[in-house]
Image (cartoon, rainbow, N blue to C red):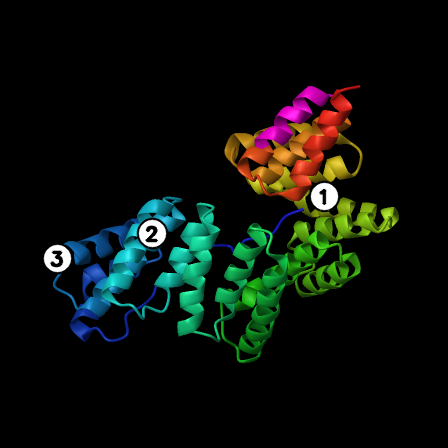
Amino acid sequence: MRILSLALVLSFFIPLNISPAEAKSRNWRDCESDSAKRAMRGCSRIIRRGRDSHYNLSVAYNNRGNVYFNKGNYEKAIADYDKAIGHNKKHPDAYSNRGTSYSKLGQERDAIADYNRAIKQFPKNGMNYFRRADSHSAIREHDRAIADYDRAIDLISIHQRATLGGENRACLPCVYNNRANNFIAMGRFVRAIADFDQAISLDPQQHANFYGNRGDAYAKLDRLDLAKKDYLYALQLLRPKLQTSPTANDRASIAYLWKQLGQPKKGLLHALIALEQTPEDFNTWDTLGGIYEAMGKTEKAIEAFRKAIKLDPIHKTGVKHLKEAETRGLY
């Protein structure tokens, strides 16, 4: 189904060597706030004033960059991370944050270069390996991705045992999930299932994607009974979200699951709604193409697959789907 990205709301870095007076100032309290409005206001005032040390200005630019990132304004985020690095080339977060912004823009080579710099500075931060692995995966460098996922798992597991909190703790099941998806891409389905099992054991109730992805691996092995069981359980986990505020990813996942269960009509509306919210998502266009194809609407399927390929030209599965649909359209 899908590679899971981090729940990326980038955290703010608290400056450690500012004076007590600065630490208590309103601008710094705002700049370090979890409130986007307050952080933007406080950091911008510090930047405009320009009287702080290079270290502190790097913090202000990084924190404001995080606000832009969390609003989806990745170009402005990158510009602020550039400034943060300019003031402090050893900033602990700016390279990684800039790399993640590049990744959001599909500039995976630039992202990898920044993750390399982050890893060079902080070789024991598992999250940087995780992020670099996802970038390698996005450009189909599966061997390199798996090597980075391996390292991320080792480091994040160590951090958990050391009670190192937050982001490291939360992402470990996603690392197993994403590594498993790379094993699927390499045709190593049994190995993928082992990783999905591990992801599910760590987070059995939260991620429908784990079950849907494991269902895909079972389907590749013609274990259709187990595949169906996983698809149905994934739907069960997603249904409550339809009663609240389903995301585009939730809708796309539901559409995909109904397609896999042989009931494409039930997934069609979800796919269309998902694309209204995220029209640049390759996976959802690919799912929509599969739905139309299963419904016998070959021309619409070809159109959807072509849009998917335009968004991700090197995706082998998408190219395969398009060629199959175009072949069927000739008869």
Q: Is residue 98 left or right of residue 185?
A: left
Q: Are marks 2 and 1 in contact (CB under 8 Å)?
A: no
Q: Position of residue 12 (x, y in %)?
A: 35, 62
Q: Is residue 248 visible?
A: yes
Which residue position holds label 2?
78
Which amino acid, by three-letter code, is at mark 3?
Answer: Arg
User: How many angstroms separate mark 3 from mark 1 (CA)?
Assistant: 53 Å
Residue that sits furthest to the bottom in the current view = 162
| Chief SS of the magenta region | helix
> Is disc 3 placed on a helix, strand or loop?
helix
> Is disc 2 placed on a helix, strand or loop?
helix
Along the viewing direction, whichever of 102 and 163 lies nearer the viewer: 102
First of labels 3, 2 by sequence position = 3
Quarter assignment of residue 156: bottom right
> Is disc 1 placed on a helix, strand or loop?
helix
Q: Position of residue 203 (x, y in %)?
A: 66, 61
Quarter assignment of residue 137: bottom right
Q: Which residues are magenta?
A: 297-307
Q: Is residue 9 visible?
A: no
Q: Position of residue 289 (x, y in %)?
A: 67, 30
Q: Any magenta on residue 184?
A: no
Q: Are marks 3 and 1 in contact (CB under 8 Å)?
A: no
User: How many angstroms separate mark 2 from mark 1 (CA)?
Assistant: 37 Å
In the image, residue 319 above or below residue 9: above
Which residue position holds label 1?
235
Which amino acid, by three-letter code, is at mark 2?
Answer: Ile
Mark identifier at residue 49 = 3
CA neighbours of label 3 inside 10 A, class few (<14), some (14 to 19), many (20+): few
Along the viewing direction, whichever of 109 and 49 lies nearer the viewer: 109
What residue lies at 72% left-to-right and 54% top-to-bottom?
184
